[in-house]
Amino acid sequence: MSSGATARRGLFVFLLVAALISLATATVQAACAPHANGTAMWNAIESHCFDHRDANSPADCVVADEKIVIARDSYKPKAFLVVARDDIAGIETESIRDNGAPNFWLAGWNNRKLVGEDWTVGLAINSECRRSQDRLHIHLDRLCPDVADELGKLNAGVRQYSGAALKPYHIAPIKVNELARANIFAMVKALTGSIPVADQSIALVAAKDDPGMAYVLYGSQGEGSGHAEDLFSYGGKCGG
């Protein structure tokens, strides 16, 4: 084969690979495009909690600080949402892993009593492609009974668990007194290595028999499929 033919063949292979990469990237971007009506949640919270707050129902909105509001979920009235007041899209946003970023998980943890007093109340965020709203929000809800049963069997030393109710999640224990200075978004990114952080789903739950311990659940069944909301009662899949 002549040097010219070899060069043309090399160029063809290069262009083919580049085209395939471009197509794959475009497919992922299309799958994770902004969601239809993706600002509806925030528009409702902004109106109800700030513009026209009803003094007769203060429990519907808890303004944690200038960066975080906790509001009742209008679709799941027994659950709440921990929401960014700044225009932050979701789990894929790099700034939420920075030092000094708002501690959304701690705000939710400290307000678990809005949903219940026992250990089965926890928090969850969905992956970029599996959420319906393009404003960072963490679900504050009660665990599904089968999930609570599985978690109740764990001990503080566990690092990974593959029980049916918890697949495909891995587990990292964390001390409750570390939540104030921990960045759980950054923690999960460090733990998952090459898996895109946008595909992850994260939950924070209490240890049943140790009030000083909690568990960070993190995982993804594949690109864009993380949906930790389903571990909780109003996620829609309890017992499914």
Image: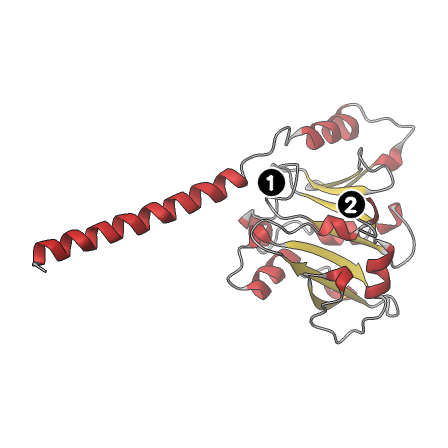
Depth check: 11 or 198 in front? 11
Q: Is residue 183 left or right of residue 14?
A: right
Residue receiving disc 1? 88
Depth check: 132 or 47 in front? 132
Residue 197's x, y, as percent?
Answer: 56, 54
Q: Is residue 20 left or right of residue 49?
A: left
Residue 218's x, y, as percent?
Answer: 67, 60
Q: Which residue is drawn at 73% across and 65% down?
A: 178
Residue 9 visible at all: yes
Residue at the farthest bottom position: 157
On screen, residue 210 above or below 105: below
Q: Is residue 152 left or right of residue 27?
A: right
The residue under label 2 is which amino acid type?
Gly
Q: Residue at x 57, y 63 (%)?
A: 192
Secondary element under disc 1, as helix, strand or loop, is: loop
Q: Which quarter of the figure has residue 172?
A: bottom right
The residue under label 1 is which amino acid type?
Ile
Q: Dot 2 surroundings within 10 Å: few (below 14), some, or many (20 or more)? A: some
Q: Which quarter of the figure has residue 160?
A: bottom right
Depth check: 200 or 222 in front? 222
Q: Is residue 180 left or right of residue 9?
A: right
Residue 184's x, y, as percent?
Answer: 66, 58
Query: What's the distance in space between the residues labelled 2 and 1, CA to CA?
Result: 22 Å
Query: What label sits on residue 235 in the rendered view?
Result: 2
